Amino acid sequence: MTHGHYRVTGSRRYRGHEPGTEFIAEIAPNAEHRAVQRGDIVLLERVEPALLLGSFEFPQGWLASPHIPDQQRGAERLLSR
Amino acid sequence: MPSLWFVVPVHGRLPLAAICLRQLRRTCDALTDEGIEATAVVIGNDENLDTARELGFGTIERDNSFVSRRFNDGIQLACDRRYNPRPADYVVPCGSDDWVDHRIFLDLPGANTVLGFQRISFVREDGREMTTRFLDYEGGCGIRVYPRQVMAHRNFRPADEDRQRACDTSTLLNLRKAHPRLRVEHRDIDPRQIVDWKSPGIQLNPYGTIEARHRGEDFGDPFEALADVFPTDALDEMAFHYTRELVAA
């Protein structure tokens, strides 16, 4: 895993993030080590950023067939509502 | 038939976003008629997702903390076989306040090439003026055509996860690091090929700033200038939107 979940612990912003906030980023190992040593951030955990399961729906008809039938994709039909 | 997904983060600005998503539906249908299977995925956490569903687009629910994370979500759903058993061949990040002329996508790039656009038009926040600008950056504006193979070099999440702006720059820089042979080609068929509709309120890049920063030319009435590029229905709807906004102000 290349990304970290961090919390800003110093009194200054870090990478634009306010003190006390959390963020996920890919920080080079040396830069991460220095920032942690300075007390700017703490590493909460290593993570792999990804889509959240259950958060998404595919476009209409995308999984049903390799080609979208005309009656499913007509702008005129959808826009005439 | 090659496939292409537009990736559109949305947040608020419901009336403007709805008009732009409806126009994106027309753009997708025009591309499909030309032999490119096109659709979109819309990423957000408000009523814009209902509009997206009504138009047959895909949706992803994600909070508005970081715009770049929402772009990454959309690109991952479009291209990553671990999530999408029929991954798209191309992906195009796009704003929820943009219109695109479908003709700029008809000639799709090769596997190691990103297609960028340096000419873009901006409509002023009151809808009464339009300016065309040449963006003298390698990547041009943020709307680019990325082949799936290019996105694979960053595991389909190319932008830094924690950005609120400059997501397009982050995407291109990270892909370049991961794929040094990456090339960027430009295509400019018309100064009105991409239109960014500004709206009152907080703007990352207000019309006045853009006009001052980049070289280009000004048009008068945007609705006259765009009449032979975009559908009358879409232009009428947008003109009504700006009129209503002005009255409300």
Image (cartoon, coloured by chain):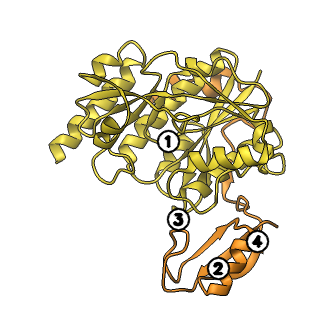
Chain colours: A orange, B yellow
Q: Amino acid at mark 4?
A: Pro
Q: For mark 3, what is the residue?
A: B65
Q: Are marks 4 and 1 on the same chain?
A: no
Q: Which image quadrant: the N terminus of chain B?
A: top right
Q: For mark 2, what is the residue?
A: A35
**Would residue B182 be visible to someone looking at this image?**
yes
Q: Amino acid at mark 3?
A: Ser
Q: Are marks 1 and 3 on the same chain?
A: yes
Output the chain of dot 4: A
Distance of mark 1 from mark 2, alpha carbons? 34 Å
Q: Residue at x 25, y 29 (%)?
A: B129
**Would residue B87 be visible to someone looking at this image?**
no
Q: Residue at x 48, y 57 (%)?
A: B46
Q: Nearer the viewer, mark 4 or mark 3?
A: 4
Q: Earlier in the sequence, mark 1 or mark 3?
A: 3
Label annotation for residue B95: 1
Distance of mark 2 from mark 4, alpha carbons? 10 Å
Q: For mark 4, what is the residue?
A: A29
Distance of mark 1 from mark 3, alpha carbons? 17 Å
**Tag 4 near tag 1, CB within 8 Å:** no
Q: Amino acid at mark 1?
A: Gly
Q: Amino acid at mark 2?
A: Ala
Q: Is residue A3 left or right of residue B81?
A: left
Output the chain of dot 2: A
Q: Is residue A23 left or right of residue B158?
A: left
Nearest the viewer among B202 and A38 is: A38
Q: Is residue B186 left or right of residue B20?
A: right
